[in-house]
Image: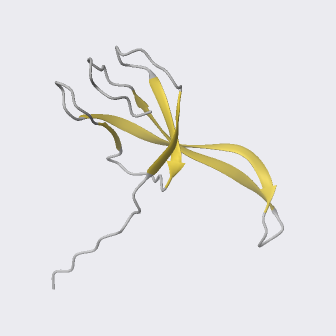
């Protein structure tokens, strides 16, 4: 009896990338905030556009950080507010490669 199990994850949406500017030489730490970000062993960030390199994929890490506390509407207890975000290193870009921000 072969059964295939799968999980559906909504497409991540990036709402903010910091810093706003980096060197085109690559290697700068980027932080990406957004929705539907989730922890995964194979997380990566894709930079795509018209360039001699085509699409560039760099490894990334899922991060969490407690940024404050608020009272829960359901339990009326104090709960941590957690920021979920992704970090990666910027790739080296050549002329004509659009930046993702």
Q: Residue at x 79, y 55 (%)?
A: 70
Picture coordinates of residue 50, whole percent (x, y):
22, 31
Question: Can you name the residue that lies furthest to the bottom here?
Answer: 1
Q: Residue at x 52, y 26 (%)?
A: 20
Q: Residue at x 35, y 48 (%)?
A: 41
Q: Is residue 95 left or right of residue 16?
A: left
Is residue 48 or residue 82 the one in the foreground?
48
Q: Is residue 72 left or right of residue 50?
A: right
Where is 16 relative to 52, above or below?
below
Picture coordinates of residue 61, whole percent (x, y):
43, 39
Quadrant assignment for the C terminus: top left
Q: Is residue 51 left or right of residue 36?
A: left
Q: Residue at x 37, y 29 (%)?
A: 99
Judging from the image, the colouring scheme is secondary structure
Where is 49 relative to 14, above or below?
above
Quadrant assignment for the N terminus: bottom left
Picture coordinates of residue 97, whole percent (x, y):
28, 26
Is residue 65 or residue 8 the one in the foreground?
8
Picture coordinates of residue 36, whole percent (x, y):
48, 56
Q: How many marks?
A: 0
Q: Is residue 2 left or right of residue 49?
A: left
Report which quarter residue 92 is drawn in: top left
């Amino acid at each position: 009896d072969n059964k295939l199990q799968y999980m559906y994850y909504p497409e991540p949406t990036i709402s903010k990338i910091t810093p706003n500017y980096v060197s085109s030489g690559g290697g700068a730490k980027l932080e990406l905030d957004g929705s539907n970000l989730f922890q995964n062993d194979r997380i990566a960030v894709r930079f795509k556009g018209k360039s001699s390199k085509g699409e560039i994929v760099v490894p990334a890490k899922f991060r969490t950080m407690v940024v404050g506390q608020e009272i829960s509407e359901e339990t009326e207890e104090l709960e941590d507010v957690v920021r979920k975000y992704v970090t990666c290193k910027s790739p080296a870009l050549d002329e004509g490669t659009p930046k993702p921000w």
